[in-house]
Image (cartoon, coloured by chain):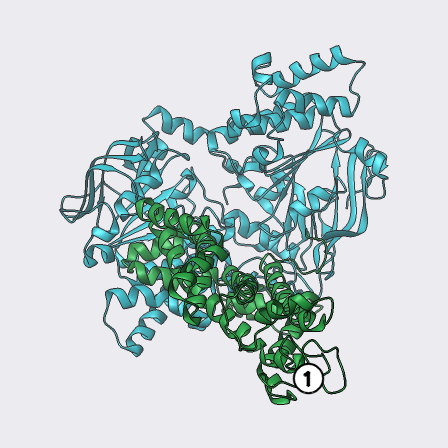
């Protein structure tokens, strides 16, 4: 897109990648360049083709995909037409790749020292063995891992997830490549680990002047790392520009909506989702694929894909109305959320109280004497990293914990049995649980009608019409159309599936709604819409809600109270705003500091 | 949506005043068929092996069902000297008593089909029930059932069948039951493995949390999700049933003379295989073709279930 500059490390021209037998495009018309020492963030939702585009820089395609057009130049090498032996030199030498899941990328049968040495040997680093051994130690220092013999003799399974990812990063930097492709390297990690890994990547790219392409779905992550950002939608690059420009004045409506959908940990901005979902390969329309979800669409959008235009070479956009969007798009006016005034008032009824609950997994104690209360009309967020026991606590309340529990879980003053089987029908009806993954919580062999009928038939005696009417009502509550009733879950998008799961819980007319990480499987724009929906439902129906999440940034939008959990204990409990603005526990402070967030200036 | 010229852009519309978005039904998400097993069958049908197997099976079934109506003689009628070679009066020669081989072949298939399918159904019903209970219950019930099935598995199936048939006599229902029981442990294992995996899924937990009885969870939540592996298992077990029924007849524990039965025919005529081979070769070929056809179908189904859309080269 931009004029050739002397320091261009990578240039991608008109890249088109298709599914092999069918010829359906995954990526089309992708062109960008990366300069010396620059970090380009490639942002997109799932199925936007970002990973496919990224791996094509190494001339690699997963099974079933094929690069059909375009060229990729790294330094002076054209990668796509390179011979097999030339590619071997390019990969790991000129350009290297850090995968999403390091635990799957490292060879479990080789010691990490051997694996790191392998890549140095393969590319004949330096003059000989001694120099390579020195480099190996240096690499470990660079990624802040111990470089002693004992550590290098470990196998990948003996390292933590963060350490494994560091080894993968060390491997990528081993031969001091020109360009590193990082494919969501922190998605599988906890926020604290993620912060450390991001720091390492930033320091290394600065230290060696290495360019990087950072692929992610999370704008907040690239906000602290990238110099420029490229936004992909449905296999096409819709906007590319310097980070500051993009955050304060994006030209493309999608970029603007995406920014508004990012949960904001510090500010008062309300969350706005984007209706609908991103089309997958094969469902894309001829023109701009964002048309059905766009507030700015005109007839032309559906038929013609706009050319790349922009204010200057650096900031390019593909939208017919980008000038109008730039000049007139409403800066999402400060829709302030309602602040909760006080903790549970005395006149509000406590619906669930957990007293001194200790829970075991097999014989291991994973919750240590936890106390918590949940009041009517309130939403309590349960926050913590993986392994903190937050889901266990939620499952103890829901009667889904399969192992030993001591202490009491009370519902409206009455002790609950450990397993749902031992509870009365009214108790089972009152507490409804929404699972993390909508891909696993809906039986794929049942229609939406059959799924929704299940709780209605169990808890209410309704005739055919009454049942149908209630189904339509709960679907309406979750903003879905009654025409979906005859569909199967596979015919719905992830966001729609999660709405069905919510509708199924609502159909039981619960007193307590437990949401277990309900957005962690969803795209950012869909996540925001689900959070909006849950917050609205909670306000309107007055249901008491327990919102379990690992994402501190989300809780402002939905909860009034928060309990921070760590290692099976609640370390801090209070009002959301108070805890986020003035955390008391050290653990909360740490968690807050490590949560990536958008830079202050782009708080639109 | 705004209308008008395409070149000139329409005046700006503020957020939220647009009419509701059109339903996105125009671009349906990739959806598989109504039911998993229907989908598996239709995927399998695209494979050449399934088609060949199916055609073979239908031809053999037609021989077994309708062969008796075109047979030239009665199966017990003496038409010539024993072990006569093929001639114009008897195309496949005669057997050890001088009966027409072609006629007996045309009559002798029905028992193999009926008994084989019945035994397989019994094996599937027993095995699936035990597998479902075992996989969902876990703990002591799981252990008891599986160890009990291990005992059954420890007997070579033919020996197990012979044991009971020699005690109670060669009764058809007993043969069918014993063949079914000998399939039971393997089918139960397949079912159990699939059930254990499914029982950990959230939708099963969700049903349990709603208070759905276990029996209903097994039938309505778990079973529909394992229909494909069971379909494959049915095809595979049918192959073994046919072999076993034929084998039992061959060693004299199955159909009794003077019935016309492929397995029995092989036994009766094997002494003269060098003199009049057709009396042995014809039933052998038919049994072989039948087992190959069911095996091809089962293999096609298994490939379809694993998402392999080619006849050759697995992955």
- The colour of chain B is green
Q: Is residue B212 above or below residue A400?
A: below
Q: List x then y, in percent, for residue A443.
A: 43, 60
Q: Which residue is mark 1?
A: B80
- For this orientation, the residue located farthest to the top is A130
Single out the residue that lies furthest toward the front. B81
Helix, strand, or loop for circle 1? loop
Front residue of this view, candidates B165 and A415: B165
Residue A380 to residue A458: above or below: above
Colour displayed for chain A in the image of the structure: cyan
Tell me if A88 is positioned left or right of A153 in this view.
right
**Above or below — where is A34 with respect to A158?**
below
B87, above or below B282, in the image:
below
Q: Chain of mark 1?
A: B
Please report the residue visible at 54 percent of the width from the left and 65 percent of the height from the top.
B238
Give me the residue at 37% from left, 26% from top.
A587
Q: Nearer the viewer, residue A111 or A206?
A: A111
């Amino acid at each position: 897109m931009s004029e050739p500059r002397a320091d261009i490390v990578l240039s991608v021209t008109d890249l088109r990648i298709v599914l092999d037998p069918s010829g359906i495009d995954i990526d089309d018309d992708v062109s960008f360049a990366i300069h010396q020492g620059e970090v380009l963030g490639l942002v997109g939702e799932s199925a936007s083709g970002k990973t496919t585009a990224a791996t094509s820089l190494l001339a690699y395609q997963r099974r079933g995909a094929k690069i059909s057009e375009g060229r990729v130049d790294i330094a002076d090498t054209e990668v796509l037409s390179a011979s097999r032996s030339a590619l071997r030199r390019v990969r790991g030498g000129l350009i290297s790749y850090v995968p999403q899941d390091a635990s799957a990328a490292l060879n479990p049968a080789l010691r990490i020292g051997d694996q790191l040495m392998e890549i140095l040997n393969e590319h004949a680093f330096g003059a000989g063995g001694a120099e390579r051994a020195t480099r190996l130690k240096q690499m470990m220092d660079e990624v802040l891992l111990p470089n002693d013999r004992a550590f290098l003799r470990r196998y990948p399974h003996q390292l933590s997830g963060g350490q494994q990812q560091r080894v993968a990063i060390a491997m990528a930097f081993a031969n001091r490549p020109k360009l590193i492709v990082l494919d969501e390297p922190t998605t599988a990690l906890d926020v604290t680990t993620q912060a450390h890994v991001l720091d390492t990547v930033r320091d290394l790219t600065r230290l060696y002047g290495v360019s990087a392409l950072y692929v992610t779905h999370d704008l907040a992550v690239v906000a602290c790392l990238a110099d420029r950002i490229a936004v992909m939608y449905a296999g096409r690059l819709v906007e590319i520009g310097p980070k500051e420009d993009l955050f304060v004045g994006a030209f493309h409506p999608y970029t603007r909506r995406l920014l508004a959908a990012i949960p904001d940990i510090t500010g008062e901005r309300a969350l706005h989702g984007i209706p609908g979902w991103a089309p997958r390969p094969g469902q894309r329309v001829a023109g701009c694929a964002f048309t059905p979800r766009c507030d700015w669409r005109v007839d032309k959008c559906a038929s013609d894909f706009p050319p790349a235009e922009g204010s200057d070479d650096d900031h390019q956009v593909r939208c017919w109305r980008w000038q109008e969007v730039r000049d007139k798009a409403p800066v999402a006016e400060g829709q302030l959320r309602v602040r909760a005034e006080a903790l549970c008032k005395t006149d509000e009824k406590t619906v669930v109280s957990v007293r001194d609950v200790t829970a075991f997994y097999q014989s291991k104690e994973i919750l240590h004497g936890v106390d918590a209360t949940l009041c009517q009309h309130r939403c309590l967020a349960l926050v913590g990293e993986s392994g903190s026991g937050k889901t266990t606590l939620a499952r103890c309340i829901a009667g889904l914990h399969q192992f030993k529990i001591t202490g009491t879980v009370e519902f409206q003053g009455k002790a609950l049995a450990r397993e749902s089987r031992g509870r009365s029908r009214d108790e089972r009806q009152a507490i409804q649980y929404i699972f993390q993954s909508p891909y696993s919580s809906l039986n794929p062999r049942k229609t939406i009608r059959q799924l929704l009928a299940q709780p209605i038939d169990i808890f209410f005696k309704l005739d055919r019409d009454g049942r149908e009417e209630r189904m339509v009502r709960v679907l309406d509550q979750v903003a879905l159309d009654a025409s979906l009733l005859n569909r199967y879950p596979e015919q719905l998008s992830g966001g729609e599936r999660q709405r069905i799961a919510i509708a199924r819980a609502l159909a039981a007319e619960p007193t307590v709604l437990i949401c277990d990480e309900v957005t962690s499987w969803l795209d950012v724009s869909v996540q925001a819409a689900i959070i909006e929906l849950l917050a609205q439902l909670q306000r309107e129906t007055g249901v008491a809600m327990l919102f379990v999440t690992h994402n501190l940034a989300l809780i402002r939008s939905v909860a009034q109270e928060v309990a921070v959990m760590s290692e099976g204990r609640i370390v801090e409990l209070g009002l959301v705003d108070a805890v986020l603005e003035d955390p008391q526990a050290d653990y909360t402070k740490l968690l807050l500091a490590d949560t990536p967030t958008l830079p202050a200036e782009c708080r639109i | 949506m705004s209308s008008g010229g395409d070149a000139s852009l329409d005046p700006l519309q503020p957020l939220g005043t647009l009419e509701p978005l059109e339903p996105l039904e125009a671009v349906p998400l990739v959806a598989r068929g109504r039911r998993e097993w229907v989908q598996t069958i239709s995927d399998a049908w695209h494979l050449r092996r399934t088609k060949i197997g199916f055609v073979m099976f239908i031809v053999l079934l037609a021989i077994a069902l309708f062969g008796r109506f075109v047979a030239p003689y009665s199966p017990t009628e003496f038409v010539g000297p024993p072990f006569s070679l093929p001639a114009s009066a008897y195309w496949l020669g005669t057997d050890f008593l001088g009966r027409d081989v072609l006629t007996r072949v045309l009559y002798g298939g029905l028992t193999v089909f009926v008994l084989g399918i019945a035994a397989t159904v019994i094996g599937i019903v027993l095995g699936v029930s035990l597998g479902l209970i075992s996989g969902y219950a876990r703990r002591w019930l799981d252990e008891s059932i599986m160890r009990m099935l291990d005992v059954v598995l420890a007997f070579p199936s033919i020996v197990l069948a012979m044991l009971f048939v020699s005690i109670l006599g060669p009764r058809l229902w007993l043969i069918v039951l014993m063949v079914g029981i000998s399939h039971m442990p393997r089918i139960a294992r397949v079912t159990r493995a699939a059930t254990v995996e499914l029982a950990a899924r959230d939708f099963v937990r969700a049903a349990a949390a709603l208070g759905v009885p276990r029996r209903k969870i097994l039938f309505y939540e778990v079973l529909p999700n394992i229909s494909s592996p069971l379909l494959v298992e049915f095809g595979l077990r049918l192959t073994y049933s046919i072999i076993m029924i034929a084998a039992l007849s061959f060693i004299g524990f199955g159909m009794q003379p003077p019935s016309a039965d492929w397995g029995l025919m092989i036994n009766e005529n094997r002494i003269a295989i060098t003199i009049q081979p057709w009396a042995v070769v014809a039933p052998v070929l038919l049994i072989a073709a039948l087992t190959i056809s069911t095996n091809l179908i089962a293999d096609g189904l298994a490939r379809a279930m694993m998402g392999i859309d080619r006849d050759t080269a697995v992955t």
